[in-house]
Amino acid sequence: MYRFKSKSVIPIYLIGLVWLIYSFSFPLYRIQDFVIAAILSFAVFFAGTYMITIKDQKNGIEYINTGDRDLDEMLETAAKNLNMLKFLSQNIINTKMAGQVKQLENVSVKILDLVKNEPNKASKASQFFNYYLSETVKILISYKEFEAGGRSGKNLTTAMTQIEEFMVKLAEAYQKILDGLYKDEVTDVSIDMEVMAAMLKQDQYL
């Protein structure tokens, strides 16, 4: 399962609760009272954050916190679509088709991880996450429904064959999308090698 979520706001609410309880228990008119309340707030905040983090780690949840709320939401939606791809790859009866779906899933995971770690690539991947991935899931759900229905017929068979053939093309397209996200890095490496080779030749080492 690909489980992602944004940071919990519970620790922030705990800070407010500390100040509320403290204000009812002690008069906040001395500087030391504010200092004590602030120290308690920080302690509760960090304790709450630690406990939630430990719990989520045990449940296999990874935080998405790129600093961009829209990007975090996009990646969370992508994670849900990846879970559906995983489910479909495990439950589609046609083994060849299931393998194609697994291939799409693997490439999609690489794209998600890349964008999560390098948010500057989000604009290049937005079309993939917002359209291609979600539409792929929609098409594959239809395929699974056709397959699970147990019905036969020329139209149904034709539709399933078309989807199977399209998945082959889609796997190639997904790989090109991933390669495109690495284009800048590949270009930089090529330039570095060319410069180094030129210097080595100049120094008569090549």
Image: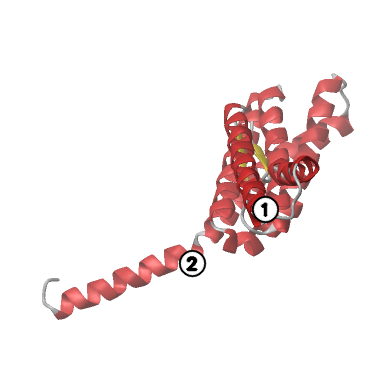
Colour mapping used in the image = secondary structure
Looking at the image, which residue is at 62% across and 27% down? Answer: 59
Question: Residue 118, located in which quarter of the rendered image?
Answer: bottom right
Rendered location of residue 191, percent (x, y): 36, 72
**Viewer-nearest residue: 15 or 148:** 15
Rendered location of residue 101, percent (x, y): 65, 35
**Viewer-nearest residue: 134 or 50:** 50
Q: Secondary structure at mark 2?
A: helix
Marks 2 and 1 sit apart, C-alpha to C-alpha, by 52 Å
Q: Which mark is residue 184?
A: 2
Rendered location of residue 197, percent (x, y): 23, 72
Residue 57 visible in the snapshot: yes
| Up-down relation of residue 96 to residue 15 (above or below) | above
Residue 81 visible in the snapshot: no
| Up-down relation of residue 40 to residue 155 (above or below) | below
**Viewer-nearest residue: 52 or 28:** 28
User: What amino acid type should be assigned to the residue bearing mark 2?
Assistant: Asp
Looking at the image, which residue is at 56% across and 47% down? Answer: 113
Looking at the image, which residue is at 63% across and 63% down? Answer: 124
Quadrant in the picture for the N terminus: top right
**Viewer-nearest residue: 155 or 197:** 197
User: What amino acid type should be assigned to the residue bearing mark 1?
Assistant: Phe
Task: Please report whichever mark, 2 or 1, sits nearer to the chain's N-terminal start.
Answer: 1
Disc 2: CA contacts within 10 A as few (<14), some (14-19) or many (>=20): few
Q: Which residue is mark 1?
A: 34
Residue lying farthest to the bottom in this orientation: 202
Quadrant in the picture for the C terminus: bottom left
